């Protein structure tokens, strides 16, 4: 398995930042979250997550957005009441994140094109 993501925790703002690189599939997204769960990367008191896809290419069909949402719901103990900012600069990736947003239950997601806007939304 090729690791095409990394994590940083912004202690000041209490935000987990996940950066993706290269071509990303549904399996990559799920595996990256499993890695976070197994390594206790979602810290208690975390206000939300910024998922930065600006250096990645989503190889994901629009219909797969429901499978991503299903994974989040199956693992709601990690995502409950979280804000999930999806940072992207490609139209296809923005569309996938908007479809994903329609399935939000127990958490809130929103697409952004700038890091500052994503951080501001999570921390307000």
Image: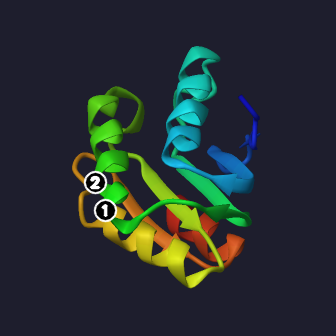
Check contact, mark 1 vs mark 2: CB within 8 A.
Answer: yes
- Asked which secondary structure carries label 1, the reply is helix
Instruction: Give how far apart the Cα atoms at labels 1 and 2 are.
Output: 6 Å
Question: Which residue is located at x 54 percent, y 64 percent?
Answer: 86
Q: Is residue 109 left or right of residue 73?
A: right
Q: Is residue 52 left or right of residue 25?
A: right
Residue 102 x, y percent position in the rendering? 25, 66
Q: Image quadrant of residue 65?
A: bottom left
- Can you say whether 9 is above or below 78 in the image? below
Pick the front one: 89 or 16: 89
> Residue at 32% across / 69% down in the picture?
99
In the drawing, does residue 115 fall left or right of residue 31? right
Secondary structure under the numbered disc 2 in the rendered image: helix
Residue 71, numbered circle: none
* Residue 58 in the image, given as x and y percentages of width and height: 59, 62
Residue farthest to the bottom? 91
Residue at the farthest top position: 38
Report x, y in % for residue 12: 73, 47
- Res 64 visible: yes
- The circle drawn on residue 66 is 2
**Above or below, comparing residue 69 to residue 100 in the picture:** above
- Picture residue at 60% right of the left edge, 55% below the top: 51
Q: Which residue is mark 1?
A: 63
User: What residue is drawn where x is 60% and y is 19%?
Assistant: 40
């Amino acid at each position: 398995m090729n690791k095409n993501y990394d994590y940083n925790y912004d202690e000041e703002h209490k935000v987990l930042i996940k950066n993706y690189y290269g071509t990303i599939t549904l399996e990559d997204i799920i595996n990256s979250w499993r890695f976070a769960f197994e390594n206790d990367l979602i810290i208690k008191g975390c206000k939300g997550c910024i998922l930065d896809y600006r250096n990645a290419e989503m190889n994901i069909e629009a219909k797969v957005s429901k499978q991503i949402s299903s994974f989040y719901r199956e693992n709601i103990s990690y995502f409950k009441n979280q804000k999930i900012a999806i940072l992207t600069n490609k139209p296809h990736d923005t569309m996938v994140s908007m479809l994903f947003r329609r399935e939000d239950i127990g958490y809130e997601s929103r697409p952004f094109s700038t890091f500052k806007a994503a951080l501001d939304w999570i921390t307000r």
